[in-house]
Image (cartoon, rainbow, N blue to C red):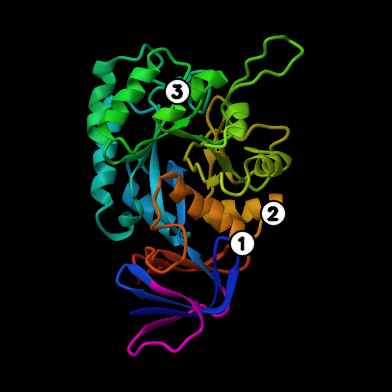
Amino acid sequence: MLAIVNAYIVKPDHIIPDGVILCRGKKIVYAGPKKPLPENCEIIDAKGNFAGPGLIDIHTHAAGSYWYYNEPEKAARITLAHGTTSVYPTLYYDLDQKQYIESAALNRKVSKKGAGRVIRGLYMEGPYLNPKFGANQSGNVWKGPIKKEEYMPIIEAAADFAQFWSVAPERPGVKGFVSDVRRANPNIVFTVAHSEAAPSDIEELIPLGLKIGTHHTNATGDRPKYPEVRGVCVDETVNSRDEIYAEIISDSKGIHVDPYMQRLILKIKGKDKIILISDACVFDGPVPGEGYEGVTDINFDWDGQIAGSKLTLDVACRNFMMHTGSSICDVFRFASLNPARAMGDLSRGHISEGADADMIIVDGFMKVKKVILQGELQKI
């Protein structure tokens, strides 16, 4: 049995001081106030730090200098060392059919052992997004008509392993694609991404499982009826619909999402519908000039577009605390409990009896001290 002692246990809405967590195998069997320990426990002394659930990054393409699509094992080691115990590698629309299929198979294989166990499924950011939006637009090989003979091999290779699938609802034929994905995996979670869809287009897909706004306020359009009037589009629909979670990339300078906007989204969506993501990539285009001085944690493509981040999720949590004044309980909710709930997974995202023994020990500003994966202390 594993025992974590001398910990401030982070619950969704409160903290248990001087707490004890007991794990048997891959499950938590006790989490509460200090009490005598069973004999022969492996003891981890939290030394007065905070013990919270392992982070869940549902949307990241990379970690460090490694892309998940082709080097998932190396990326997973970095991800795990930063306290993320569940990750959903994101496959982008710059992959062709063969690369989608091969990458899905590779990530599935790597997920079965070692640090690769953090890989719990895939986040399919494509292929059918709006080609006007997003990084590396010149690399989008899916700008043409949606064709069943082109997408079915990808669905057959990835749907049972994928947990999330992004679409631009305004693309002609996308509803047929959504229906085919859903037939292959009835539990799939759809997201609206890289889109200028009207609210009605998005709302039509909610009954089919659309429940996340991908990197909210990034790579979305506007649909003004009159030149002088702001239109309503993706961002307004995500803000308005209670069913939809809002992903946020919180970089240090608030470039992806301005700090004021982060606070506004939190006010609108509330604590139950925010999901922090890293959206890490490895694009190496030059940093543009004015306005981007001192930027170190975001990427740019060779067209000068923002191209994801260099974040890990623990750092994104820290940035969100800084930008919004959120508490440590809040950011564990946004980076662990909420993504688990979005998937309908009640076994992760919280420290409770019966929950999975995926945990991290951090200081008060989310700097990772120790990582426990499936009830085992990891070397980080």
Q: Is residue 99 visible?
A: no
Answer above or below: position of 14 versus 274.
below
User: Which mark is nearer the camera, 2 or 1?
Assistant: 1
Marked residue nearer the N-terminal end (2 or 1): 2
Instruction: Give, as a three-letter code, the residue at label 3.
Output: Leu
Q: Nearer the viewer, residue 89 or 66?
A: 89
Residue at the spot 59% in from the left edge and 27% down from the top edge: 237
Q: Are marks 3 and 2 in contact (CB under 8 Å)?
A: no
Mark 3 packing: few (<14 Cα in 10 Å), some, or many (20+)? many
Q: Residue furthest right?
A: 228
Residue occupying the point 45% across, 23% down: 129
Q: In the drawing, what numbered circle is on residue 322?
A: 2
Q: Quadrant of the C terminus?
A: bottom left
Q: Earlier in the sequence, mark 3 or mark 1?
A: 3
Residue shown at the point (55%, 55%) measured from the top left: 333
Q: Amino acid at mark 2?
A: Met
Residue 280 in percent (x, y) is at 49, 43
Q: Which residue is mark 1?
A: 328
Q: Earlier in the sequence, mark 3 or mark 2?
A: 3
Mark 1, Cα crowd under 10 Å, few <14 / some 14-19 / many 20+, is many
Q: Position of residue 116 (x, y in %)?
A: 31, 54
Going by the picture, which residue comes out furthest to the top? 226
- Element class at badge 1: helix
Q: Residue tagged by mark 3?
A: 129
Left or right placement of residue 218 versus residue 28 in this view: right
Region of the chain picked out in magenta, as a range = 29-49
